[in-house]
């Protein structure tokens, strides 16, 4: 088989039905499907079996389907390992059961692996179905945190060519048979979280890398959580940082510096700090000061007025004089969509200056003028 597609399923019938229909329409020949029902219940089990019967009839051997039903949930890591132990394809895919798969996703990922043979691993770009904004296109790291790279950005604003990331989620992921053979199975001590990151870190120690191809796009509801996910998050995260904390590196800072390097007269911008993660914010300003004419000692810090994950209301935070400041503003926030609820302030600000820039700790660079449109493809803060 050219491809083995492993689908771990702990899902509601409604969401699973949408996924299965998209899979039926997009799965390509010379593929084995391995469906692992991880204790989802009898209704889901019957949906999976009905799907298997339909696909076997429609595809006449070009696609094979194997189903496994766990009576009780074992967690994502064990479910994926059940699939890995059965997979025989030259390329192995992990596909979440809450996706809406777009045409060409499978051949697109195979193309990426062919064009980047030394990398060995690739992941697709995932969009929010309800907004069209970027939900996942890799993980970026600061000094202390991993964040979704380019979260909430428009797909057309992503890099125009495939790019390497330190890690990516297994929601839509593929690797060569060689990677699977060299790395083996997932570490089941992670329970419903971070087993995908751990696996890629193990692969990185052998020289493999994860490549994101912006041409490979599907949709992700983010509704596949599994049992005890929240309860195990802290232990999963602690295990990951204990094992790999010295192997990850701060790559969001270089991305932001590169995004601003060619900005004319950056030294005349008035810099505003609205980011809650203070160590990361300090790193951003230090790096920009080292690489550009920006004076980090002149940064205006209003971060203490920002409250949690709520929208940032600029009229409540900033001095009125900044509304008519003739110099352009450079605003740092956790994620730029926190500024969307400022229609009146933005409209007034644009009468004075249209060159304001927003940067965030997910690697985004957005013109403040763009936020005035009143509509943005994605607004989830995570």
Image: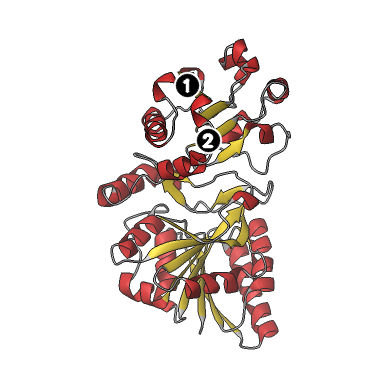
**Of marks 2 and 1, the one in the foreground:** 2
Going from N to C along the chain, the mark reached first, 2 or 1, is 1
At x 39%, y 33%, the residue is: 280
Whether residue 38 can be seen here: no
Indicate the quadrant where residue 298 lies.
top left
Q: Count the marks.
A: 2
Q: Which residue is mark 1?
A: 303
* Distance CA(mark 2)–CA(mark 1): 14 Å
Q: Residue 124: give its label.
A: none
Name the disc covering residue 359, or none: 2
Please identify the residue farthest to the top as the structure is shown. Answer: 320
Residue lying furthest front: 265
Give the residue drawn at x 61%, y 74%. Answer: 49
Residue 365 placement, left or right of 189: right
Tell me the residue at 69%/24% (across/down): 346
Q: In this rendering, does residue 37 appear at all?
A: yes
Q: Please tell me whether residue 273 is drawn above or below residue 241 in the rendered image.
A: above
Q: Residues within 10 Å of mark 1 (few under 14, many from 20)?
A: some
User: Image height check: is 366 above or below 244?
Assistant: above
Which quadrant of the figure has residue 153?
A: top right
Position of residue 344 in the picture relative to residue 380 (left or right): right
Nearer-the-camera pick, 267 or 272: 267
Residue 255 is left or right of residue 377, and the answer is: left
Circle 2 crowding by C-alpha within 10 Å: few under 14, some 14–19, many from 20: many
Q: Between residues 111 and 259, which one lies in front from this camera angle? A: 259
Q: Position of residue 278 (x, y in %)?
A: 39, 27
| Secondary structure category for the residue under label 2 | strand
Question: Residue 66, how many percent across, how many down?
Answer: 53, 78
Identify which residue is drawn at 40% across, 61% down: 77
Asked if residue 303 is positioned above or below residue 246 in the image, the reply reads above
- Residue 356 picture location, percent across and down: 61, 29
């Amino acid at each position: 088989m050219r491809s083995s597609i492993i689908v771990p399923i702990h899902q509601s019938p409604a969401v699973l039905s949408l996924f299965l229909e998209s899979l039926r329409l997009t799965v390509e020949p010379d593929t084995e499907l391995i469906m692992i029902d991880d204790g989802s219940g009898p209704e889901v089990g019957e949906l999976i079996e009905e799907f298997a019967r339909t696909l076997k009839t429609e595809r006449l051997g070009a696609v094979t389907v194997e189903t496994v039903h766990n009576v009780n949930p074992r967690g994502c890591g064990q479910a994926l390992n059940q699939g890995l132990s059965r997979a025989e394809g030259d390329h192995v895919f992990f596909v979440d059961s809450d996706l809406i798969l777009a045409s060409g996703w499978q051949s697109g990922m195979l193309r990426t692996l062919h064009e980047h043979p030394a990398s060995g691993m690739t992941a697709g770009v995932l969009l929010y179905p309800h907004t069209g904004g970027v939900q996942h296109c890799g993980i970026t790291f600061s000094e202390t945190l991993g964040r979704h790279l380019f979260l909430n950005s428009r797909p057309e604003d992503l890099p125009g060519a495939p790019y390497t990331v330190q890690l990516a989620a297994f929601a839509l992921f593929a690797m060569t048979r060689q990677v699977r053979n060299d790395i083996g199975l997932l570490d089941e001590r992670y329970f419903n979280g971070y087993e995908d990151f751990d696996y890629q870190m193990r692969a990185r120690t052998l020289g493999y890398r994860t490549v994101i191809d912006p041409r490979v796009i599907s949709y992700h509801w983010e509704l596949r959580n599994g049992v005890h996910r929240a309860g195990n998050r802290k232990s999963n995260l602690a295990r990951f940082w204990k094992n790999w904390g010295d192997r990850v590196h701060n790559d969001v800072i270089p991305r932001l510096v590169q995004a601003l390097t060619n900005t004319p007269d950056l030294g005349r911008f008035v810099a505003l700090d609205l980011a809650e993660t203070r160590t990361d914010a300090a790193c951003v300003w230090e790096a920009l000061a080292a690489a550009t004419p920006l004076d980090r000692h002149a940064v205006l810090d209003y971060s203490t007025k920002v409250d949690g994950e709520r929208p940032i209301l600029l009229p409540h935070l900033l001095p009125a004089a900044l509304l008519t400041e003739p110099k352009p503003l450079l605003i740092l926030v956790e994620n730029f969509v926190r500024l969307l609820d400022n229609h009146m302030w933005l409209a007034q600000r644009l009468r004075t200056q249209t060159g304001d820039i927003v940067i965030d700790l997910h690697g985004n660079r957005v013109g403040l003028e763009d936020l005035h449109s009143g509509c943005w493809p994605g607004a989830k803060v995570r």
